[in-house]
Amino acid sequence: MRFQTELVPARLIRRYKRFLADCRLEDGQEVTAHCANPGSMMGLAEPETKVWLEPNDDPKKKLKYGWRLVDHENGHFTGVDTSLPNRVLRAALQDRRIEALAAYTTVRPEVKYGQNSRIDFLLQANGFPDAYVEVKSVTLCRTPGLAEFPDSVTARGAKHMADLAQVTREGHRAVLLYLVQRTDCTHVDIARDIDPAYATAHAEATAAGVETLCIGTQISPAKVEIYAPLALGRPAR
């Protein structure tokens, strides 16, 4: 998925109220950007971090910039927009580019299911059980090469695990898909110390038959694309 508008580099001044970020453009101008990320953004919101912003001229939008990327200035990037993974994955699922889900011919986003929940994608095909796919954006990295989820306590995430487990009991396929919006990680694991309840819910869902897929991305100031499967679990020492 290519960004709609050419991104511009800036330096982060501060992130506040979760969805706002003051940034300094290269010409010294200070602007406020929308931060589409409700998580803690641990390790990604330090002052003077290099970031990439997407400008817009939409009169309906109060803020004229959106924060899209963190530039680690070593050739690697992290995508911070949590609305982006579903757009990237919808195209990939429709093009049948995710091998584990390539048999499905119909992709339906935002379908109601469970206890007042919406599944990110309901996949269907003749001769196959329906597949309920829940997507999680992963940006936390505390150990080189290891991405972790979640980066803060998420009661909503634990609820999703219970809903997915129920789907498997009803004879359908349930898939938890971690999309890692970092280019510097090869493995994905659960941040058990950050949210033990989520870790327990994930283990119980796995025991019930919920599958976990981990997908990496290629990220640049021009575009974000799915890349390749990543390993679940901590890398061997």
Image (cartoon, rainbow, N blue to C red):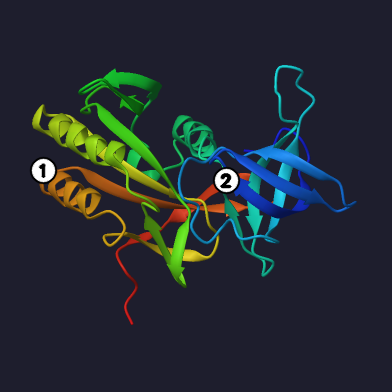
Which residue: 48% across, 58% down? 42
Q: Position of residue 136 (x, y in %)?
A: 39, 43
Q: Nearer the viewer, residue 158 or 89?
A: 158
Dividing the picture into quadrants, the one containing residue 189 is bottom left
Locate the N terminus by quadrant.
top right
Of the residues shown, which amino acid type is indicated by label 2?
Glu
Which mark is drawn over residue 208? 1
Q: CA distance from mark 2 to mark 1?
A: 31 Å
In the rendered image, the vertical position of residue 57 relative to residue 156, given as above or below: above
Using the rendered view, name the quadrant where residue 176 is placed. top left
Q: Position of residue 102 (x, y in %)?
A: 37, 37
Relative side of 121 to 71, left or right: left
Dot 2 crowding, Cα within 10 Å, few <14, some 14–19, many 20+: some
Is residue 69 shown left or right of residue 150?
right
Viewer-proximal residue, 234 or 140? 140
Residue 96 image point, x, y percent: 44, 36
Judged from this view, the residue extending furthest toward the front is 17
In terms of sequence position, does the residue under pointer 2 or pointer 1 come before the other? 1
Q: Quadrant of the C terminus?
A: bottom left
| Residue linked to disc 2 | 225
Q: Amino acid at mark 1?
A: Ala
Q: Position of residue 35 (x, y in %)?
A: 60, 40
Front in this rendered view, residue 143 or 183? 143
- Number of callouts: 2
At numbered mark 2, what does the secondary structure look like: helix, strand or loop?
A: strand
Residue at image x 79%, y 51%? 24
How many residues crowd mark 1 within 10 Å: few (<14), some (14–19), many (20+)?
some
Residue at position x 47%, y 73% in the image: 144
In the picture, residue 63 is in which quadrant? top right
